[in-house]
C-alpha cells in the first residue's frame, strides 16, 4: 500500500542473542507485534457510526407465523413486532463488552432502547403523519410525571421471504406506543411527542400486549470473526450504506495493490449467534416494567405495571424477544447470506503477501504477514478490556503452538485508544542492541558475554592482541627474535534502557607494549616498554514521534568522550642482576635501536582510541540515526483501519519492563 504500508526496517536479527546471559521471557506470547484497542474505543467508534447513520438506530422487527400452525396451511400473519430506537453506546452503557466469558474470540453485544422524539425525520422513518400522532392522543392514558400515553394505529406492508422468494404481507395493523409531555409558560403550553420503544406480542390473554422496553439492557453473545475481503468488497459495503467511504478512501489513498497486500475485515458475526440465549442486567425483582393491553377491536388500550421477574416468567415474551433479535441482527428482511455484510465492523487490517516486494529494505520479521485476534478483560475497569490484533511478520507462524491468546493487558488508562507493541526480538535487539554491541566490540575481542539485569546490560572483559611484529633490526638482537607490539584492551560498557531513552556509556583502558630480546655478551636481555591510555564516553538514544504523528523517530545526542591522554612510558626492570659493564653496553645499543622518540611514536594508544574506537562509536550512532528514521512505524499505523476510516497516531514511545517497544495509540476522528 505504498509508503504508509511499510513496516519497520531492520537489520540482522538476534546477532547478540547467543552471548547474552539472563534474557527475559517473551512478553508478547510469541507474536512479533500486538495492537490492543480498548473496549471504550470500539464503542466510541460504534457511537460515531450510529451518529453518521451507518449503524441504524431504528430497530424495526417483525415476527411472522402461519395461521393454524405448521399443518394448518393458513396464510402468513404478523404475530409480533418491535419498534424503537437504540441508544448510542457510552462508557457506562457499552454496546460491545469484550472477554465476557471463557472464549477470547467472543464478546457480549448489548443495547438498550430509548424514547425517541417524534421529529419529522423520525415520522418519515416510521411511516406515519402528524395527524396520526394527534389522533393517538384522542383518548390518552395517564403516564408518569404528568405525561400522557397515546396509541397510534398504522397500516404497513410487511416484507418477508418464502421459499427463496421475496413476499409482502400487505396492510398489516401495527400499534405504536407514544408519550406526550407538556411545558406551560404563562398561557402558552408546548407539547413534545415521543415514540416509546415497545414489543408487541400475544401474551396468552384475551388481548395482545405492548411492553415498554425503555432503558432495558438486552444482551447476547456474539463471535468476533474475520473474513478476507478486497477493495471491491469494501466498496460494496459502502454502496449499501453500512460502511463509511473513508475506509475505502484510506485503502485507495495508500496505493493498495492486491498483488502484494491482503485485506481482512474483523466484525461481529451475528450469523453464528444463538438469539434464544439473550439476557438482561436489570434486577428482575426491583425493575418495574410498564405494559399496555390492546383491544384490537376498538383500538384502545389500558396501561399497567409489573416486575421484570414476572415478565421474564412469560415464555411468550422470552420467545418473541428472541424472534425480534433474530430478525434485527440475524436473518432480517434484507439479509444477503454474507455474514460480513454488517455495519458492526471493528476494523480492517492489511497484511503483506510478499514482504520482499513490499518492503525490500526491511527485516522480514518486521513486515506484518498475518493477523489474528483475541480479547482480554480488565477486571478493574471493563472499559479498558482490549481487543488484541496478534501479528506475525515475514510469513512466520507463532513458535508457540497452538498459538495462544495474548494474556497481558498493557493498557493503563483511558487517555488513549490502546497500545501498540513490538516484541523485544523484533525491535530492540535487531534495531538497537545488536548494532550497539557490534560498535562496542573490537574485532580482536573474544566472543562477547553481555550480562543482563532487568533493563541494564553490562560488558566487562580484558584481552590482548598482536598489533605487529618485525624481524630483528640488526644482529645485535637475538637471532630469530622479532620485535613485537601488542595491545591490551579492557572495556567496561553499559547499555541502560529507561522509558524512551537508551543510555550507552563506558570506559576503555588500552595498553600498547613493545617487546624485544637483546643479546649482549651472550646474555639475553628481555626489553619491554608500554604506554597506557584510558578514556570514557557516554551517548543517549531517545525515542520520539515525528511531527506527522505516524512515524517513530530515534534521536541521538552528541557522543561525549573524555580526552584520551597517554600515560608515561614505562619499562621493565631489565637491568636487575646484570653487571654494570653489561648494563652500559646494553644502554648504548638501546639508545641506538630504541630511542625514546621512536618508542613514543610506536606506542600511542591515545591516537588509536581517537582514530579507531571513537570513530567506530560515532559512525555507528550516525548510521543508527539514519537507518532508524525511515518511516519506521508508518506501516503499523496504516495497516489497521478503524470502522470510520481513520488510522491511529502514535504517542509516548518507550520500552516497557520486558523491553518491548510500546506506544500509546489514538485513532483519528
Image (cartoon, rainbow, N blue to C red):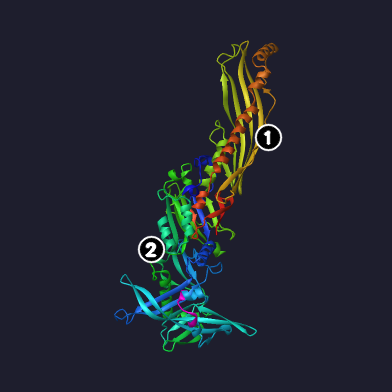
Q: Nearer the viewer, residue 27 or 231?
A: 231
Q: Quadrant of residue 223?
A: bottom left
Q: Quadrant of residue 82?
A: bottom left
The secondary element bearing badge 1 is classed as: loop
Mark 2, other Cα within 10 Å: few <14 / some 14–19 / many ≥20:
few
Q: Position of residue 365 (x, y in %)?
A: 47, 46
**Quadrant of image for the C terminus:** bottom right
Q: Position of residue 531 (x, y in %)?
A: 66, 25
Provide the residue designation for mark 1: 562
Provide the residue designation for mark 2: 338
- CA gap between label 2 and label 1 equals 69 Å
Q: Nearer the viewer, residue 397 or 457?
A: 397
- Magenta residues span 125-131
- Please indicate whether residue 113 sits to the left or right of residue 65 in the image: right
Q: Quadrant of residue 593?
A: top right
The secondary element bearing badge 2 is classed as: loop
- Mark 2 or mark 1, earlier in chain: 2
Query: Is 307 within the magenta?
Result: no
Mark 1, other Cα within 10 Å: few <14 / some 14–19 / many ≥20:
few
Amino acid at each position: 500500500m505504498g509508503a504508509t504500508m511499510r513496516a519497520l526496517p531492520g537489520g540482522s536479527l538476534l546477532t547478540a542473542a547467543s552471548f547474552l546471559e539472563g534474557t527475559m521471557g517473551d512478553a508478547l506470547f510469541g507474536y512479533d507485534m500486538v495492537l490492543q484497542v480498548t473496549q471504550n474505543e470500539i464503542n466510541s467508534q460504534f457511537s460515531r457510526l450510529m451518529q453518521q447513520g451507518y449503524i441504524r438506530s431504528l430497530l424495526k422487527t417483525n415476527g411472522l407465523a402461519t395461521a393454524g400452525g405448521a399443518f394448518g396451511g393458513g396464510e402468513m400473519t404478523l404475530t409480533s413486532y418491535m419498534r424503537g430506537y437504540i441508544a448510542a453506546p457510552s462508557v457506562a452503557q457499552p454496546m460491545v463488552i469484550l472477554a465476557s466469558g471463557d472464549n477470547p474470540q467472543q464478546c457480549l453485544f448489548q443495547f438498550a432502547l430509548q424514547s425517541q422524539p417524534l421529529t419529522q425525520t423520525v415520522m418519515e422513518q416510521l411511516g406515519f403523519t402528524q395527524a396520526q400522532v394527534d389522533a393517538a392522543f384522542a383518548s390518552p392514558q395517564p403516564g408518569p410525571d404528568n405525561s400522557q400515553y397515546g396509541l397510534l394505529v398504522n397500516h404497513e406492508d410487511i416484507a418477508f421471504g418464502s421459499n427463496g422468494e421475496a413476499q409482502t404481507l400487505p396492510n398489516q395493523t401495527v400499534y405504536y406506543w407514544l408519550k406526550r409531555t407538556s411545558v406551560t409558560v404563562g398561557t402558552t403550553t408546548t407539547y413534545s411527542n415521543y415514540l416509546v420503544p415497545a414489543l408487541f406480542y400475544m401474551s396468552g390473554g384475551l388481548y395482545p400486549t405492548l411492553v415498554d422496553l425503555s432503558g432495558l439492557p438486552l444482551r447476547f453473545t456474539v463471535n468476533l470473526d474475520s473474513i478476507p475481503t478486497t477493495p471491491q468488497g469494501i466498496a460494496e459495503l459502502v454502496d449499501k450504506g453500512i460502511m463509511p467511504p473513508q475506509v475505502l478512501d484510506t485503502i485507495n489513498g495508500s496505493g493498495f495493490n492486491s498483488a502484494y497486500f491482503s485485506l481482512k475485515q474483523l466484525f461481529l458475526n451475528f450469523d453464528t449467534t444463538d438469539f434464544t440465549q439473550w439476557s438482561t442486567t436489570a434486577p428482575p425483582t426491583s425493575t418495574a416494567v410498564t405494559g399496555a393491553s390492546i383491544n384490537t377491536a376498538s383500538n384502545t388500550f389500558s396501561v399497567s405495571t409489573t416486575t421484570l421477574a414476572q415478565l421474564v416468567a412469560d415464555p411468550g415474551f422470552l420467545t418473541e424477544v428472541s424472534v425480534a433479535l433474530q430478525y434485527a441482527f440475524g436473518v432480517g428482511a434484507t439479509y444477503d447470506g454474507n455474514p460480513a455484510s454488517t455495519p458492526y465492523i471493528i476494523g480492517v487490517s492489511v497484511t503483506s503477501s510478499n514482504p520482499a516486494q513490499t518492503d525490500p529494505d526491511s527485516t522480514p520479521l518486521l513486515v506484518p504477514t498475518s493477523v489474528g485476534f483475541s480479547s482480554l478483560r480488565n477486571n478493574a475497569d471493563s472499559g479498558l478490556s482490549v481487543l488484541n490484533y496478534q501479528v506475525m511478520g515475514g510469513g512466520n507462524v507463532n513458535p508457540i503452538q497452538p498459538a495462544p491468546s495474548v494474556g497481558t493487558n498493557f493498557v493503563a488508562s483511558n487517555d488513549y485508544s490502546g497500545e501498540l507493541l513490538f516484541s523485544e526480538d523484533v525491535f530492540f535487539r535487531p534495531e538497537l542492541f545488536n548494532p550497539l554491541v557490534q560498535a562496542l566490540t573490537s574485532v580482536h575481542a573474544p566472543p562477547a558475554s553481555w550480562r543482563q539485569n532487568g533493563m541494564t546490560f553490562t560488558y566487562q572483559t580484558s584481552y590482548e592482541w598482536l598489533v605487529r611484529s618485525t624481524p630483528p633490526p640488526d644482529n645485535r638482537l637475538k637471532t630469530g627474535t622479532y620485535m613485537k607490539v601488542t595491545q591490551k584492551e579492557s572495556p567496561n560498557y553499559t547499555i541502560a534502557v529507561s522509558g524512551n531513552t537508551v543510555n550507552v556509556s563506558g570506559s576503555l583502558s588500552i595498553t600498547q607494549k613493545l617487546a624485544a630480546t637483546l643479546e649482549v655478551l651472550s646474555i639475553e636481555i628481555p626489553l619491554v616498554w608500554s604506554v597506557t591510555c584510558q578514556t570514557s564516553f557516554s551517548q543517549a538514544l531517545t525515542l520520539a514521534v515525528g511531527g506527522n504523528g505516524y512515524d517513530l523517530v530515534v534521536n541521538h545526542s552528541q557522543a561525549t568522550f573524555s580526552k584520551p591522554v597517554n600515560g608515561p612510558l614505562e619499562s621493565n626492570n631489565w637491568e636487575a642482576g646484570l653487571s654494570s659493564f653489561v648494563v652500559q653496553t646494553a644502554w648504548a645499543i638501546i639508545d641506538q635501536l630504541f630511542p625514546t622518540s621512536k618508542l613514543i611514536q610506536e606506542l600511542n594508544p591515545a591516537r588509536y582510541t581517537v582514530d579507531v574506537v571513537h570513530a567506530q562509536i560515532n559512525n555507528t550512532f550516525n548510521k543508527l540515526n539514519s537507518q532508524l528514521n525511515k518511516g519506521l512505524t508508518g506501516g503499523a499505523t496504516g495497516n489497521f483501519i478503524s470502522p470510520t476510516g481513520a488510522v491511529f497516531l502514535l504517542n509516548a514511545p518507550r520500552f516497557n519492563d520486558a523491553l518491548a517497544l510500546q506506544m500509546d495509540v489514538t485513532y483519528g476522528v
